[in-house]
Image (cartoon, grey):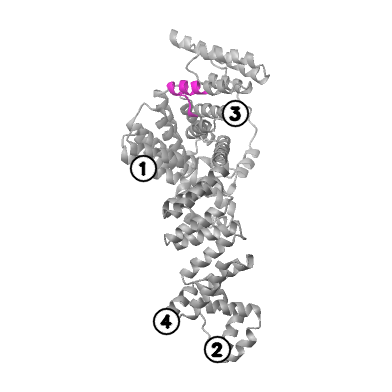
Amino acid sequence: MSDAAAEAKAKGNDAFKAQKFEEAIEHFTAAISADPSGHVLYSNRSASYASLHQYDEALADADKCIALNGAWGKGYSRKGAALIGLGRLEDAIAAFEDGLKHEPDNASLRSGLEDARAKLEGGGGLGAIGNMFSDPALFGKLAANPQTMGFLKQPDFVAKINQLQRDPSSLSAHLQDPRIMQTLGMLMGVNVQSGADFAAEQADRPERKPPPPEPEPEPMEEDLSDEERAARAARKEADGHKEAGNAAYKAKRFDEAIGHYTKAAEVLPGEMTYLTNLAAVYFEQGEYRKSAETCADAVKVGRENRADYKNVAKAYARAGNALVKLDELEKAIKAYEDSMLENRTEDVEKRLKAAKRELQQRTAQAYLSDELAQVEKDRGNALFKEGKFVDAIGAYSEAMKRNPKDHVPYSNRAACYQKLMEWQLALKDCDKCIDMCPTFVKAHTRKGALHFHLKEYHKALDAYNCALKLDGTSDEARTGVERVIVAINSTNSEEDQQARAQRALQDPEIQAIVQDPTMRNVLSDMQNDPKSANKFLKDPTIKANVEKLIAAGVLSMK
């Protein structure tokens, strides 16, 4: 498999594990484009389509998988699952049987075959009749028939019809509903009796005596080869040890259980479940290393003998549990992910998330260091003095990671961004610094300087005034206020005034002021009668708003 195909396959597997099936299909499709002969890729995409109930596409991919590798059992398993989804139970049975010809001991194929047969038998041979409900014009026919048109007003009836259209084999579960029987009769063009009518008719008939039971035939002697007889005897002996081991395990006689499971594995070395059970005993004894190693052996045996993927998943999950106890979280996460890839279960998914969360917290905690944060901050200061602002940014950023609670590196990094004319990034760092430590005067004055440079004088005044409230002796803040006022009063260019006003009107705070009904009335009165300004400016709120509009360039008073 090419690197591109392998990478796309890995992404598809991750998306499938996260139940993002459409995304998984995209990745598997990309992998197929890179490696059209990869039968596993078609199998994986088939599973993704089936998860979205797109069974036609799932069937097509399963057929392609089989065409590429007709000896691989999982391809037939995928095909059988798709056919079950399409309601083609007899074809599904044939698919599972074909797979068993290649892998007679494949538990997944045997389970699928039993499931398909149970569905077919449970439907009483009604699978083909149930397909009549798949007619696209069914609802139109129901509406046009006087005997069935009223059923469409009943939500539970409509829900049953929708279910039958999705799964025709479920017809037998609804035959007691007279509405379904009436609908079936309409589709077949006959008068089909409801369950109640049939029962009433049967009550009027004379009771029939059941025929005497036929004698059971004598069991036929199986014609087995010596090799087959030996294999069967070995299986029986090994399963006997397994049952004895299970009983001892439940009774907490762990040493006895170990003896039985070990013996079972010796008698039938190609069966992985004995090793998985043995690993469970080691886990209970606190022998976590032995448990993890035994699970690894179980997976190896399972792979060599094409074991059911659910058994392989269980071995991976059990190894993950042992590795968590050993505090080897990275290995545990890998084991859980391998388990999820084989067979997704809610329990393993929870354990995987818990392990990832714990590892992430430990990694973050291990990275924290006040001492190293100070080293990086000092390094950033030195680089800043040398004019190496980009390198200084890296040092301050590292200091933040080492000590996320320290607000000073944000202010320092803002100074670097300011030197590089990255105004918005500088403002963002100032805001973060102020949010972390509202009393840090330097952040307020730095923010004021940034707004002044951007000619956002109203915001610059706010920042400097905040600094003065915190420290009335701050020369930098006092000088900043004076500089802003001079800039406001010296703005003579009408073009510059309009540009400032346009920028200011994009500010939500300025928008709120000019859209306030009270302020609109005040501004209108002041425009019509300038002398009324003295009266309005006695209100501190109105005065503050007016000063802000003047500083922003929106309002001019001459």
Q: From the viewer's perspective, is the residue at label 2 or at label 1 nearer?
A: 2
Residue 419 x %, y %: 43, 60
Under mark 2, the amino acid is Gln
Mark 3 or mark 1, earlier in chain: 1
Residue 522 x %, y %: 60, 84
Under mark 3, the amino acid is Lys
The residue under label 4 is 493
The residue under label 3 is 325
Residue 116 appears left or right of 3: right
The residue under label 2 is 527
The rendered magenta stretch, by its main secondary structure, is classed as helix
Between 406 and 282, the residue placed more toward the observer is 406
Q: Which mark is residue 29?
A: 1
Residue range highlighted in magenta: 295-309
State how far apart marks 3 and 1 are (Cα): 39 Å
Mark 2 or mark 1, earlier in chain: 1
Count residues near mark 3 (Cα–Cα under 10 Å), then give few for <14, some for 14-19, many for 20+: some
Q: Is residue 223 visible?
A: no
Q: Secondary structure at mark 3?
A: helix
Under mark 4, the amino acid is Ser
Q: Secondary structure at mark 1?
A: helix
Mark 2 or mark 4, earlier in chain: 4
Q: Secondary structure at mark 2?
A: helix
